[in-house]
Image (spheres, helix red, strand yellow):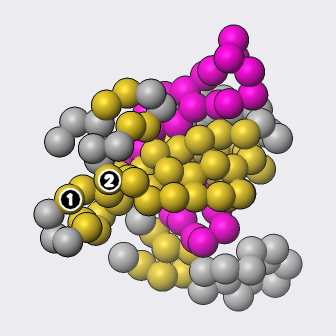
Amino acid sequence: MVRRRNITAGERRDTDRFALERELRYRTIESPAENAGGKGRTVNMSSSGVLFTVEGLLQRGHRVELAVDWPAQLNASCRLQLVALGKVVRSDENTAAIQIEKYDFRTCAATAFGNRASA
């Protein structure tokens, strides 16, 4: 894992970013009719945000839920997912960035987006 220190003049981030590439699933939670989502990969992460690849443009300001396959395991045997909720602060055709509002770690036996995760 590569740690990046934000020392650039004018940098707005308060936390360090980590170049962590992991599979993820995402979905918007603005309205049931608008539940856009897809699969992607994290590009980098910090304690306050995530930059990730997307399958389509996400609207700035919309709330998004992410489920990230976490690299560590619980008790060295149970896979984990990081489930994060946040607002889109930046987006283009290939990537989006969210500011994390809240997050939780879940075992893969738990559900994510209403689907059973496979073991």
Where is mark 1, residue-wise?
A: 78
**Element under disc 2:** strand
Q: Residues within 10 Å of mark 2 (few under 14, many from 20)?
A: some
Left or right: residue 54 versus residue 91 is left
Residue type (three-letter) at the residue carrying disc 1: Cys
**Magenta stretch, main secondary structure class:** strand
Question: From what the image shows, is residue 75 above or below residue 23?
Answer: below
Q: Residue furthest front?
A: 110
User: Is residue 48 in the magenta section?
Assistant: yes
Q: Residue at x 75, y 28 (%)?
A: 30
The residue stretch that appears in magenta: 23-50
Q: Residue at x 51, y 63 (%)?
A: 44
**Element under disc 1:** strand
Q: Based on the displayed image, in which of its 4 quarters is residue 117 positioned?
A: top left
Q: Does the CB distance between marks 1 and 2 fall below 8 Å?
A: yes
Label drawn at residue 110: none
| Foreground pick, 75 / 100 | 75
Residue type (three-letter) at the residue carrying disc 2: Thr
Q: Position of residue 99 (x, y in %)?
A: 71, 57
Q: Residues within 10 Å of mark 1 (few under 14, many from 20)?
A: few
